[in-house]
Image (cartoon, rainbow, N blue to C red):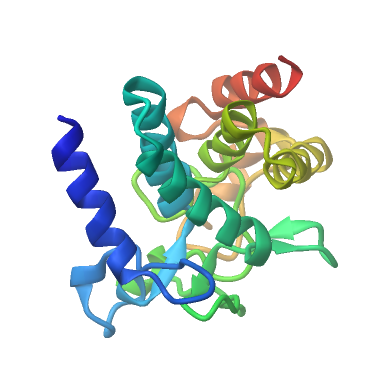
């Protein structure tokens, strides 16, 4: 299994931008769609975690190096220190896609502006808790101080805006937000993932 994973990693690396290592979430989507020209936290929280687990299981430093490149890119460009929040969608030059989110059409899936930490959807384009966890995991594997700092930024954000603060109201989930979000009910067992993240940070 290691060889197919290496090939996939090499293909994605070939799509990255020189200098920052960003690649489009879906390289085959074309530039008419946002996921064909933007880097989102699915690239870090899901793909980055898979690479680190592959490194842990095989010992092949290639997987680690790919993960480190992508995590470093998002750590350097994805955090907004003024707001103390993370951007949801980055252009391939590293600049954030700001502004209000679309409410309908495929564009409604783009996590514009800051991440919606408690969005009630598991199959979208923003994975904040996965991403928080992967930075803590990456620090344990690499001892890279940047990854610890980024994990701490996520921890501080979760502490300031816990699950009961609700999800973003100006989004496709606006019908859900008034009734349910303030109770902390959301998809993908995010409570459990936050507990797991906290435990990883403490270990």
User: Which residue is more in the foreground, 132 or 68?
Assistant: 68
Name which quarter of the figure residue 72 lies in.
Answer: bottom right
Q: Residue at x 26, y 56 (%)?
A: 10
Residue 22 falls left or right of residue 13: right
Residue 148 in percent (x, y) is at 73, 38
Using the image, determine if residue 22 lies above or below residue 190.
Answer: below
Question: Looking at the image, which residue sits at the far bottom?
Answer: 32
Residue 183 falls left or right of residue 71: right
Q: In which quadrant is the C terminus drawn? A: top right
Residue 167 in percent (x, y) is at 61, 48
Q: In which quadrant is the N terminus drawn? A: top left
Using the image, determine if residue 57 lies above or below residue 168.
Answer: above
Residue 180 in percent (x, y) is at 57, 38
Residue 37 seen in the figure: yes
Residue 76 in percent (x, y) is at 67, 62
User: Which residue is more in the foreground, 181 or 37?
Assistant: 37
């Amino acid at each position: 299994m290691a060889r197919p994973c290496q090939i996939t990693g090499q293909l994605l690396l070939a799509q990255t931008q020189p200098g920052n290592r960003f690649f489009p979430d879906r390289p085959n989507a074309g530039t008419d769609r946002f996921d064909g020209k933007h880097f989102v936290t699915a690239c870090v929280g899901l793909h980055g975690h898979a690479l680190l687990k592959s490194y842990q299981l095989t010992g092949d430093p290639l997987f680690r190096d790919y993960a480190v490149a992508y995590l470093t890119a998002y750590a350097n460009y994805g955090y907004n220190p003024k707001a103390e929040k993370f951007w949801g969608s980055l252009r391939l030059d590293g600049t954030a896609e700001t502004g209000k989110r679309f409410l309908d059409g495929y564009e409604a899936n783009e996590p514009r502006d800051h991440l919606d930490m408690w969005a009630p959807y598991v199959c979208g384009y923003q994975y904040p808790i996965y991403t928080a966890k992967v930075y803590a995991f990456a620090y344990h594997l690499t001892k890279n101080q940047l990854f610890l700092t980024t994990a701490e930024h996520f921890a501080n954000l979760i502490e300031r805006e816990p699950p009961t603060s609700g999800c973003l109201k100006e989004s496709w989930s606006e019908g859900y937000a008034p009734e349910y979000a303030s109770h902390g009910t959301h998809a993908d067992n995010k409570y459990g993932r936050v507990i797991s993240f906290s435990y990883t940070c403490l270990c």
